[in-house]
Image (spheres, rainbow, N blue to C red):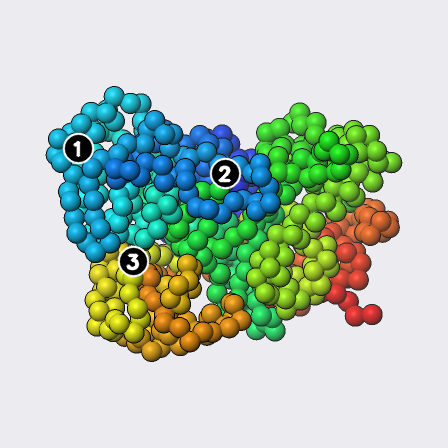
Amino acid sequence: MVNAAVGVDVGGTFTDVVLIADGELTTTKVPSTADQSDGVVHGIQQACAAAGIDPADVTEFSHAMTVSTNALLEGDGARTALVTTDGFRDVLEIGRQTRPDLYDLQAEKPSALVGRHDRLEIAERTTIDGERTPPDPDDVAALIETLRSRDVESVVVSFLHAYVDERNEELVADRLREELDVAVSASHEVLNEFREYERTSTAAVDAYVTPAIDSYISRLADRATELGLPRPRIMQSNGGIASAAEIRSHAVQTVLSGPAAGVVGASQAAAADESPFEGFVTFDMGGTSSDVSLIRDGDVERTNDNEIGGYPIRVPMVDVTTVGAGGGSIAWVDSGGALRVGPRSAGSDPGPACYGRGGQQPTVTDANLVLGYINRNTQLGGELELEYDAAIDALERLADDADLGSPIEAAQGVFRVANANMTRAIRSVTVERGHDPREFGLVAFGGAGPMHAVALAESLNIGTVVVPRVSGVLSAYGLLDADETYDAVRTHQTALEATTAEALESIYGDLVAELPVEAARDAVDVRRSADLRYSGQSFELEVEATDPVDTASLRTAFERKHERVYGYTADERVEVVNLRAAATIPRSAPPTAAASDTIEKLGEHTALFGGEEHRTPIYRRPMTPGRTLDGPAVLEQEESTTVVPPAWAATVRENGSLVLTEVDG
C-alpha cells in the first residue's frame, strides 16, 4: 500500500504541488487557472503521473488558496447585508480616526464591504454590564421580509456588546438561517471581542467571502472525490490546518492561507540545525507579490491585528507584510518619467513576455532572463519554454519610454527597483520594529525569491541566506508539516489586581470547550494567553498564561514584553482585556528519501552582477550534504532558480537546504 500525501498551494501565477509517496519527493508547477480547482486537479494529476502512482493512492490532501484574498482585493465577493443595533448602521463607514496616510488630504479608505442601502437596523440592546433588551419578534419578522426582497447572498449580524451576551445576536442569526437561503455570519461566532468596528469589520469580511469559499471547497471536494482523493484540509491564516467543514463555517480564517503555509515551511527549514541568529526573515517572492515575515526564537511571528485591502481583520494570523513585486510584476514609467515596478502583474495569462503567450509588457521575469539569472534553455515547471527575444523586445520598448540606453540597462533598472520595493518590506518588519536585520538570516523561497535573495541580503547587510530544498514550492511543502490549529477568544475587561486565578481559570475552561471537537484528542496542546495593557492605554500586548494561571506571573510577563517592545515599564494598574486559547494537534511532514549525490553542469552563459559581465556556470542544483559551490553560479531546479553572485558561496546542508554566505576576502 502506498503512503502518499499531497500539498497544493495556489498562487497568482502558478499552482504548486508537492507529493511525498513512500518517502520519494515529487514537485510540480502548473499555471493557475480562473477556477482554481482546475489548476489544483491538473497539478495533482501531473505530480501523481510523475511519481507513478494513482491519485486514489493519496491518503492526505492539504491545500492553501487565494479565493478569499482575491475576493477582497478585487471587490468581487458576495453582495452582503448588515443587521446591526439601531443607530449603528454606519460603523463600517465611520471606522477609526486613523488615516492611511497622515499628511495626504486626498487619501481615501476603501469602500465599505456593505453598501448603506443594505445596512439594516433593529431595536435591541445589550449593555456593557450585560443588561439586555431583546428584539421584538415582529421586528425580526419584518427584517426577514426586507432581506428576502433583496438580492443579497450573505448577511452579517453584529450587535453592540454581543461579546458580553450573545443571546440577541444568536436569536436573530438563527431565525435568518431558518428563513433565508443565504450565508449568515454572527459577530460573536467570528470574533468574540470588544471594539465594535473591528468586530463588525471582521464579521463582514467573513460574510463577504463565505459564499465564494463555500462554492470553491464544494467544487474542489467533488473533484477530489472523482479522483479518489480524500477531502481537502485547508491552511488557515494562523499557520494551522483545519478541516474543510471548519473552514466553511469560518471563511475569514483563510485570508492569508498561502503566505502562512510558506512561513510554516520556512520555519521548518530554518530550524534544521543550531543557528547563531536572533531569528530569520522569511522572503517569499512569487509571480504576483512578495511576502515577508519574521521567525524569532524558533517561533513564527503572529498577530491578532491586521488589515487586508484596508479592511481590519482581528483573527489570529501569521504576521505577513506583502508588497506588489513578483516575477510577473509589470515595469512601467510614471508621468514623471520614473521607472516603476508593480503592483500590476501579468499573472499566468498572458504572463511575462518571455512566456510566449501574447504578453507584451516587460516584467521582472523578463529582466532576470536578460540579465542571465535564468537559463535561456530552461523550462519553467518542466514544461514552459522561455522566449529570450520576446523579453528583449519588451525591455527595448521600456528603455525607449524610460530614456534608457538599451534593453540591458532597462533590465538592470527593473531588477534594482523591484529589489528596492522588497527591501522596504523587509525593513518594515525589522528596522521599523526595533530589530537589526544584521542579526537575522534570510530564508528565501518562492519561484523568484532565491534569484533576488542575495541582492536583498547585501542591501541589508545580512550575511547568510538559506534556500530550502523545495524553495520554489515551499508553501505547498509547508502544508504537509503544518499542525492542526484552532483558536478561541473572549473579552474579559477587568483590572488584573481585581480578578482571581479562579475566575480566569473558569473562562479558560469555557474557551477550551468552545474549540472544535477535533481539538479534544489526547495529542492536543492547549496554549493559553491574555491581552493586557496599562490602564489608559488603547492597545494591548498578548502574553502567555501559565497553567494553572497566576495573576502575578501575568503581570511579570506583560512588563517584560512591554519593555522589550516599547522600551519601558510603568508603575500603573494593569488591565485584562481578552483571554485566548489555542489548541494545536502536532503533525509532521512525511519523511523523504535521501537526495542524489551527483552534480550536473548544464552549461554556462554571461550574467551581469553589479553592472559587470561574468561568465557564469549553470548547474542542476546540488543536493549532496557538505558540497560547496563558489559564485558566480546559477543553480537550477524545476520549480525555481538560485543565483549565487561573485564573492558568495553555496553549501548544501543535511536537509538539502542551501546556505549562501559571503566569501571571506
Q: Amino acid at mark 3?
A: Thr
**Which residue is at a point 29% across and 38% down the rendered structure image?**
87
- Could you tell me if residue 134 is visible in this image? yes
Quarter of the C terminus within the rendering:
bottom right
Q: Position of residue 54 (x, y in %)?
A: 42, 42
Q: Position of residue 295 (x, y in %)?
A: 53, 63
Q: Earlier in the sequence, mark 1 or mark 3?
A: 1
Give the quarter of the image for residue 456: bottom right
Q: Earlier in the sequence, mark 1 or mark 2?
A: 2
Mark 3 element type: strand
How far apart marks 1 and 3 lie (CA) works out to 27 Å
Q: Which amino acid type is shown beneath numbered disc 2?
A: Lys
User: In the rendered image, is residue 583 in sight?
Assistant: no
Left or right: where does residue 596 sit relative to residue 501?
right
Q: CA distance from mark 1 to mark 2?
A: 32 Å
Using the image as rendered, state which of residue 313 and residue 327 is in the foreground: 313
The residue depicted at 80 percent of the width and 58 percent of the height is 646
The residue lying at 46 percent from left, 71 percent from top is: 561
Q: Which residue is farthest left? A: 137
Cα distance, mark 3 to mark 2?
28 Å
Label 1: element kind: helix
Q: Is residue 258 left or right of residue 551?
A: right
Would you call the spot at circle 1 few (<14 residues within 10 Å), some (14-19), or many (20 or more)? some
Q: What residue is disc 1 on?
A: 140
Task: Check residue 491 in the rendering and tell me which mark sits there, or answer none.
Answer: 3
Q: What residue would you read off at disc 2? A: 109
